Image (cartoon, grey):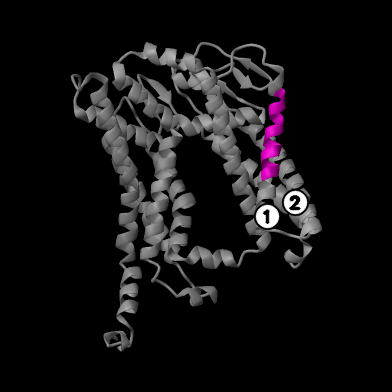
């Protein structure tokens, strides 16, 4: 009989479920947003601190130094993932370990998404937002979130820095704010439901173009990863030999493996730059590209075994230039099945614009993957960013253009009734 009774009502006439939902989505915005930024920064910082402490113990069983040295290394590694750079024995190291950067971005996304869900009840409801009512919930929450993150980063730099390491605090703040802007704002908007409302007003062409760009970038990163792993496996004996010469037992092996995982995103971007054609440099006066390889003395690091041999290159490497347009063709065709159109111009624009956008995104990422990693000639280890931009935009744009046209032609021929002609 109790199931036939109406749900209990509050004094305001709302059910208990409505009150519970309102309490869940109307928590204090200032407290939640600021705390969310601190939590997002602390999540990855604690991982780096724990790794640094474990590394200090694994190197010599903790017989030298104190645990605070391991914690300092972990904190400096986290700061390097935020663009700080460090000085080691007077030598500037500016390359960013992008594995830490990606881990921080993931923590920002997860925390920001939960924050958005927690503050979704602030401001106008969905109907009010759709009708154009003013809504500052996302900008305000994102600003407080970024402030909490940046303050945590500055505090970490203040505690971990020393006269000999000298990480750049302004660069840490800049990268913290940039990560919160690029990752945190979309996460908060998505979690609060605002993103779905705002993107619904975008033209289909814009959403389809973004879909093509996303597919091209993801597929190209996958191809670049496979290329790097194949190159490493082919010369795995060299990597194993270098690993054996490092000494230090199993602890050193674990540390090298962890460092390799942290630098894996950098290696993937180097690999993608190579497959695009321009290649990269691993020291002043060197070149690694499908057209030629000029190397010098290299540090003893196992991942460098993936580099091709110095000297003339095999004839088949010239065919690698077909990979970028082929990847863009496949990605554009794949996207066209999700966002079909009956107009050739529409299909061509989507594919070409998405490919060009993907080329710009990849070249920006590639430009962040290098920097100084040691003294002397090792101050220049990076892809040729501008050349990568030109090759990526051209190859992805042409591949996306052809893919969009071919699939549009096929869809017009095989299922013209299922395609919305008003797109």
Q: Is residue 149 above or below residue 33?
A: above
Q: Is residue 109 above or below residue 130?
A: above
Kindly give the residue lying farthest to the front in the view shown: 1
Q: Is residue 344 above or below residue 357?
A: below
Question: What number is the disc on residue 337?
Answer: 1
Q: Nearer the viewer, residue 314 or 391?
A: 314
Quadrant in which the N terminus is drawn: bottom left
Report the residue at 61% width, 30% height from top: 273
Q: What residue range appears in magenta?
A: 318-330
Q: Secondary structure at mark 1?
A: helix
Report the residue at 42% width, 66% height from top: 137
Task: Please provide percent x and percent y for residue 197.
Answer: 53, 68
Question: What number is the disc on residue 259?
Answer: none
Report the residue at 64% width, 41% height from top: 359
Per the image, is 121 magenta?
Answer: no
Q: Nearer the viewer, residue 417 or 267?
A: 417
Residue 222 found in image quarter: top right
* Residue 112 relative to residue 298: left or right: left
Q: Main secondary structure of the magenta part?
A: helix
Disc 2 to disc 1, C-alpha distance: 8 Å
Mark 2 surroundings within 10 Å by alpha-carbon count, few (fewer than 14), some (14 through 19), many (20 or more): many
Task: Please provide percent x and percent y for residue 80.
Answer: 39, 34
Closer to the chain start, of discs 2 and 1, is 1
Task: Please provide percent x and percent y for residue 131.
Answer: 54, 77
Q: Which residue is mark 2?
A: 407
Whether tag 2 and tag 1 are in contact, CB under 8 A, the answer is yes
Task: Please provide percent x and percent y for residue 257.
Answer: 38, 26
Residue 46 found in image quarter: top left
Question: In this orientation, does residue 200 appear?
Answer: yes
């Amino acid at each position: 009989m109790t199931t036939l009774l109406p749900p209990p009502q509050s004094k305001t006439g709302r059910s208990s479920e409505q009150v519970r939902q309102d309490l869940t989505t109307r928590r204090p915005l200032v407290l939640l947003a600021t705390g969310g930024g601190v939590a997002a920064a602390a999540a990855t910082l604690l991982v780096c601190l724990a790794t640094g402490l474990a590394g200090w113990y694994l190197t010599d069983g903790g017989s030298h130094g104190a645990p605070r040295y391991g914690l300092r290394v972990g904190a400096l590694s986290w700061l390097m993932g935020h663009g700080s750079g460090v000085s080691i024995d007077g030598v500037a190291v500016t390359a960013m370990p992008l594995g830490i950067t990606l881990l921080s971005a993931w923590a920002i996304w997860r925390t920001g998404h939960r924050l958005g869900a927690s503050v979704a009840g602030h401001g106008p409801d969905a109907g009010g937002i759709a009708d154009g009512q003013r809504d500052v919930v996302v900008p305000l929450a994102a600003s407080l979130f970024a402030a909490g993150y940046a303050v945590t980063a500055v505090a970490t730099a203040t505690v971990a820095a020393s006269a000999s390491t000298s990480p750049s605090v302004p660069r840490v703040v800049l990268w913290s704010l940039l990560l919160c802007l690029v990752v945190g704002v979309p996460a908060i908007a998505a979690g609060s439901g605002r993103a779905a409302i705002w993107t619904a007003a975008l033209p289909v062409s814009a959403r389809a173009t973004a879909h093509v760009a996303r597919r091209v970038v993801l597929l190209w990163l996958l191809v670049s990863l496979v290329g790097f792993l194949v190159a490493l496996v082919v010369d795995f004996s060299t990597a194993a030999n270098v690993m054996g010469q490092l000494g230090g037992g199993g602890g050193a092996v674990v540390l090298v493996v962890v460092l390799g995982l942290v630098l894996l995103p950098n290696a993937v971007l180097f690999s993608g730059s190579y497959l695009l054609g321009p290649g990269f440099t691993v020291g002043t006066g060197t070149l690694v590209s499908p057209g030629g390889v000029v190397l010098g003395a290299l540090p003893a690091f196992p991942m460098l075994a993936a580099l091709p041999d110095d000297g003339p290159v095999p004839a088949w490497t010239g065919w690698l230039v077909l990979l970028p347009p082929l990847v863009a063709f496949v990605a554009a065709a794949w996207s066209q099945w999700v966002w079909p159109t009956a107009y050739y111009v529409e299909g061509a624009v989507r594919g070409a614009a998405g490919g060009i956008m993907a080329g710009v995104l990849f070249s920006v990422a590639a430009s962040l993957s290098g920097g100084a990693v040691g003294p002397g000639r090792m101050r220049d280890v990076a892809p040729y960013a501008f050349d990568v931009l030109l090759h990526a935009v051209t190859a992805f744009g042409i591949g996306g253009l052809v893919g969009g046209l071919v699939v549009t032609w096929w869809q017009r021929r095989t299922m013209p009734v299922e395609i919305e002609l008003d797109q």
